[in-house]
Amino acid sequence: MNALMIVMAGILGGAVLLLILLKLCVRIRVPPGVCRRTEREWEEVRGTRDPGRRVLGADAVFDGLLRSLFPGEDFVERMRRAERRLPNTEAVWRAHKVRNRIAHEAGAAMDEREAAQAVQAFEKAIRSLLRG
């Protein structure tokens, strides 16, 4: 039952994020293509059932947005430039470390709670970056 509640909360959170993204994209001067891409990619993340793949997808959406805002740098440099605009820098770094463990350690275990925390960190960071 707890896993189902976490999944449902993730789905609800994703829907809320999409609405927020639409509003933010209209209010601030984020290129429309970046907003549409972010929305489309986040929808894919939201529909992903596997917790590990959901984390990988959330990291990819976040990194894509960072690349749009800070082109030509690696992830570490983009994060350093974005840090002053992120209210949850430490949570994003932890989430990215979870992503790295999934991507680079064969058979890395991933539970729903850890995945949900990582995805929420990326979601909060995306909202902050879109606000400008």
Image: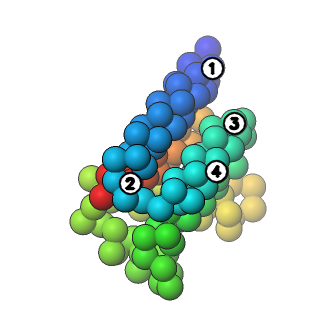
- In the rendered image, residue 86, in percent from the top left (x then y), is placed at 30, 58
Query: Picture coordinates of residue 19 (x, y %)?
Result: 47, 34
The residue nearer to you, when weighing 95 against 106, is 95
Query: In this orientation, does residue 27 appear?
Result: yes
Vertical relation: 15 (above or below) 5: below
- Cα separation between marks 3 and 2: 22 Å
- Name the residue tied to disc 2: 130
Q: Quadrant of the C terminus?
A: bottom left
Q: CA distance from mark 3 to mark 4?
A: 10 Å
Residue ID for mark 3: 47
> Of callouts 4 and 2, which one flags the residue occurring earlier in the amino acid sequence?
4
Answer yes or no: do the residues labelled 2 and 1 have beta carbons within 8 Å?
A: no
Residue type at numbered disc 1: Leu
Q: Which mark is residue 41?
A: 4
Residue that mark 1 sits on? 4
Q: Position of residue 53 (x, y in %)?
A: 69, 49
Residue pushed farthest bottom? Answer: 72
